[in-house]
């Protein structure tokens, strides 16, 4: 007597239960279709979050620069001049006697899009202090995607 006959005669429901544990090709295809539909819904919604996170990171970094520049100004008596002034937050300028930095823990980072932050002192928008901006995703100064220290963030939907 073979094993299948023996199992059937001893416990007929046992073979049926073994057969029902496997997935059919239709069931697997149905699961893949459902996963595809979910991915089509979720991925576009999450991709907008990446830009929002980069924008928030740039705003946070500009805020950190603001704090460091204010500490520099208190110690030295003025803000760093010129376009490379952010470097004076980590390296002492040659002509400064009251520099008590570094005012940042690390080198000046690029913005979240990989571009250098733009610093000008005196600023065009803040003539009594400085302007800082991230060029945003397009990598160009100007446009509505720049992140600056003189504009309030606009709500993007």
Image (spheres, rainbow, N blue to C red):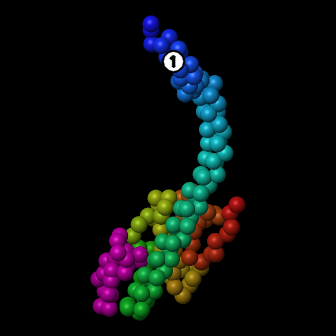
Query: Residue at point 32% right, 87% down?
Result: 100
Helix, strand or loop status at disc 1: helix
Image coordinates of residue 92 in percent, x first then y, are: 31, 81
Left or right of 8, for residue 39: right
Image coordinates of residue 12 in percent, x first then y, are: 56, 19
Image coordinates of residue 76 in percent, x first then y, are: 38, 90
Q: Is residue 111 shown above or below 66?
A: above
Q: Name the residue at the front extreme.
A: 10
* Res. 38 image quadrant: top right
Query: Residue at point 59% right, 66% down?
Result: 146
Query: Residue at point 33% right, 83% down?
Result: 101
Residue 141 appears in the picture as rendered: no
Image coordinates of residue 5 in percent, x first then y, are: 50, 11
Left or right of 105, for residue 50: right
Residue range in magenta is: 85-107
Q: Is residue 145 shown above or below 27?
A: below
Query: Is residue 97 located in the magenta-colored stretch of the structure?
Result: yes
Left or right of 23, for residue 106: left
Q: Quadrant of the C terminus?
A: bottom right
Q: Judge by depth and name the residue closer to the eye, 27 or 64.
A: 27
Q: Name the residue at the top extreme.
A: 1
Query: Residue at point 34% right, 71% down?
Result: 106
Residue 110 appears in the picture as rendered: yes
Q: Which residue is mark 1?
A: 10
Q: Judge by depth and name the residue closer to the eye, 113 or 128.
A: 113
Query: Is residue 41 located in the magenta-colored stretch of the structure?
Result: no
* Res. 69 image quadrant: bottom left
Q: Quadrant of the N terminus?
A: top left
Q: Main secondary structure of the magenta part?
A: loop
Q: Is residue 10 shown above or below 134?
A: above
Q: Judge by depth and name the residue closer to the eye, 80 or 147.
A: 147
């Amino acid at each position: 007597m073979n094993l299948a006959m023996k199992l059937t005669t001893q416990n007929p429901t046992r073979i049926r239960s073994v057969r029902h544990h496997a997935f059919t090709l239709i069931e697997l295809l149905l699961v893949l279709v459902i996963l595809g539909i979910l991915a089509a819904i979720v991925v576009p919604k999450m991709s907008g979050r990446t830009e929002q996170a980069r924008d928030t990171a740039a705003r946070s970094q500009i805020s950190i620069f603001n704090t460091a520049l204010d500490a520099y100004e208190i110690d030295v008596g003025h803000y760093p001049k010129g376009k490379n002034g952010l470097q004076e937050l980590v390296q002492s300028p040659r002509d400064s006697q009251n520099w008590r930095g570094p005012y940042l823990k690390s080198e000046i980072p690029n913005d979240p899009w990989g571009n250098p932050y733009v610093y000008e002192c005196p600023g065009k928008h803040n003539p009594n202090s400085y302007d800082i901006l991230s060029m945003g995703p397009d990598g160009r100064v100007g446009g509505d995607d720049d992140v600056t220290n003189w504009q309030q963030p606009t709500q993007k939907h």
